[in-house]
Image (cartoon, rainbow, N blue to C red):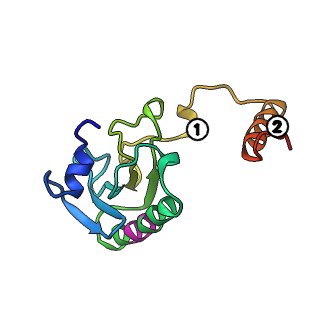
Amino acid sequence: MDECVFCEIVAGRAPASLVYADDKVTAFLDDGPVTPGHLLIIPNEHFVLLADLPDGLAEHMLRVGMRLAAAIRSSGMPCEGINLFVADGEAAGQEVFHHHLHVIPRWGRDGFVITASAWSLPRPTRHDLDGNAAVIRAALNGGSRA
């Protein structure tokens, strides 16, 4: 494995503005934030993708994310909403290949845009949606179409 900056943060060998840590995860401020207060929650062990996480770790990360979102809202920092975001793989925009959950404080006109109007695909037909649902159900059910 190449040197991982997130592993270095967990080990205390790289600087980070820590907000939370327990035996499973560490949370710190993103040094390239979308908005002030933008946090990253990382597993203390190195896992690249969501599918690599052991049972229960993703759920723990989400619970910690919920606690930190509540803390941001009550902190007095600008926050009218929260985005929780995971970029799972390079094609999804993952730049640091150590799984992480973004907790991003939001407010009107903060300049960060995630809207359906920004998506470039045309709206699918119900037939297309039903076909895609069947394919995903089949994979979920171990290959048998439901």
Q: Nearer the viewer, residue 101 or 36?
A: 101
| Residue type at numbered disc 1 | Ala
78 lies left or right of 67 = left
| Residue type at numbered disc 2 | Asp
Residue occupied by mark 1: 116
78 lies left or right of 85 = left
Report if the CB atoms under discs 2 and 1 are less than 8 Å apart.
no
Q: Give the range drawn in magenta.
A: 65-70
Q: Nearer the viewer, residue 132 or 21?
A: 21
Which quadrant, please, contains the N terminus? Answer: top left
Determine crowd level at label 2: few under 14, some 14-19, many 20+ residues with C-alpha closer than 10 A: few
From the top left corner, tell me how far across and down residue 61 is, in percent. 44, 62
Which quadrant, please, contains the C terminus? Answer: top right
Magenta: main secondary structure equals helix
From the top left corner, tell me how far across and down residue 12 is, in percent. 15, 58
Q: Which of 72 and 1 is in front in this view?
A: 1
Residue occupied by mark 2: 130
Q: In this view, does 109 lie above or below 67?
A: above
From the top left corner, tell me how far across and down residue 121 is, in percent. 63, 26
